[in-house]
Image: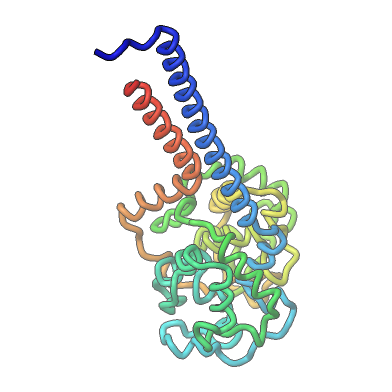
Amino acid sequence: MSARPRSGSVKTYMHKRVWIRAASMTIFFLGISLLAMALIAVMTVQAQDETPDQDDLIIGALLYDRWYAALDQDPPEQDNPLWERQSTNTRSGPETWRCVECHGWDYKGVDGAYGSGSHYTGFPNVRRLSSKMSMEEILDHLNGGKDPAHDFSPYIPDEHLSKIAIFLKYGLLDDDLYIDPISLKVIAGDISHGEELYEEVCAKCHGDDGKLIVFREEGVDEFLGTVANRDPWRFLHRTRFGTAGTLMPVGVALGWSPEDGRDILAYSQTLPTGIVPSEQSQAGESAKPASDLGGPAENFWQGILTGLAAFLGTFGASILFLSVLVAVGVLVVFVLRRR
């Protein structure tokens, strides 16, 4: 028979095992903590890198609207080479060179409000495409690297092409969160709040009833209320970023959130919408009126997916971090039960 270990040796052995386990657990939790801190640091740096300069964003949006007006230069007189690839939009000359004429005020091109009516071209949804592309890839499209007919570099300086890319990458809204594509009415807008902002800023130029500035197009005079009800996507874009070639106040520069712009749109949809013929207009410019009042309806499941995408875009980082913590907790319980 083997000799029994001495009592002191057993105590020393057990004492060492306890310390080894304690040290192992300490190292484990320290490693998890450092990993979590590293993930947070990386996500913070990425968020900072993806925060564009506000001025660049505004300029990019104005260039998207009407780049030659934003640059105060004469537009090309001939049609854009891309215009030969479509036959449904009958506009010609300078209008064919505008980003918005191809891709829409909702940035969805053929998938949005310009998916039918007189603006229809069949050109793509840049909101979806730009979300999957890097800045370099977007710039490559703008300077003709992917398609020579889409080369804007002879007309727009490189520094301004980069601002358009910044806007396309970081400045596009999902307007489906704010505008119903069927009724064209604002979703969940605060009309009272919109009225306060309108009276504070907009009424100085447009008047209390939105009729002080008249938008002239194709022999028809439109008021602000007309635009808000007929083309709410254009209204929302220009409320955020202003109108190219004018001194219109810029919402983002005033600190307005997208929800503020939505509320102003909701109030403006209550303003007079009368359309009257006139030989002269006072000021302004608008896109061509379309016979169709909006784009194709979005189906039920696409609406559900849009909502989930918006939710995860805001809280995805938090969900990931909480998942890591839950996993750590399960692992700790497993280790303790093994003991």
- Compared to residue 277, the image places residue 310 above or below, namely above
Quarter holding the N terminus?
top left
Q: Relative to residue 32, is residue 181 drawn left or right?
A: left
Identify the coloring.
rainbow
Give the image location of residue 22, x and y in percent.
48, 23
Q: What residue is rendered at 45% in x and 71% in y?
A: 109
Give the image location of residue 298, x and y in percent.
35, 58
- Compared to residue 187, the image places residue 124 above or below, namely below
The one of 269 and 9 positioned closer to us in this rendering: 9
Q: What residue is rendered at 38% in x and 31% in y?
A: 331
Quarter holding the C terminus?
top left
Q: What residue is rendered at 46% in x and 68% in y?
A: 129
Instruction: Identify the image quadrant of residue 227.
Output: bottom right
Give the image location of residue 276, x and y in percent.
57, 68
Q: Relative to residue 177, is residue 93 drawn left or right?
A: right
Disc tally is: 0
> Which residue occupies the extreme bottom position in the image?
78
The one of 270 and 3 positioned closer to us in this rendering: 3
Q: What residue is rendered at 52% in x and 45% in y?
A: 189
> Which residue occupies the extreme top position in the image?
7
Give the image location of residue 286, x and y in percent.
60, 71
The reply to whether residue 196 is visible in this rendering is: yes
The reply to whether residue 219 is visible in this rendering is: no
The one of 139 and 199 positioned closer to us in this rendering: 139
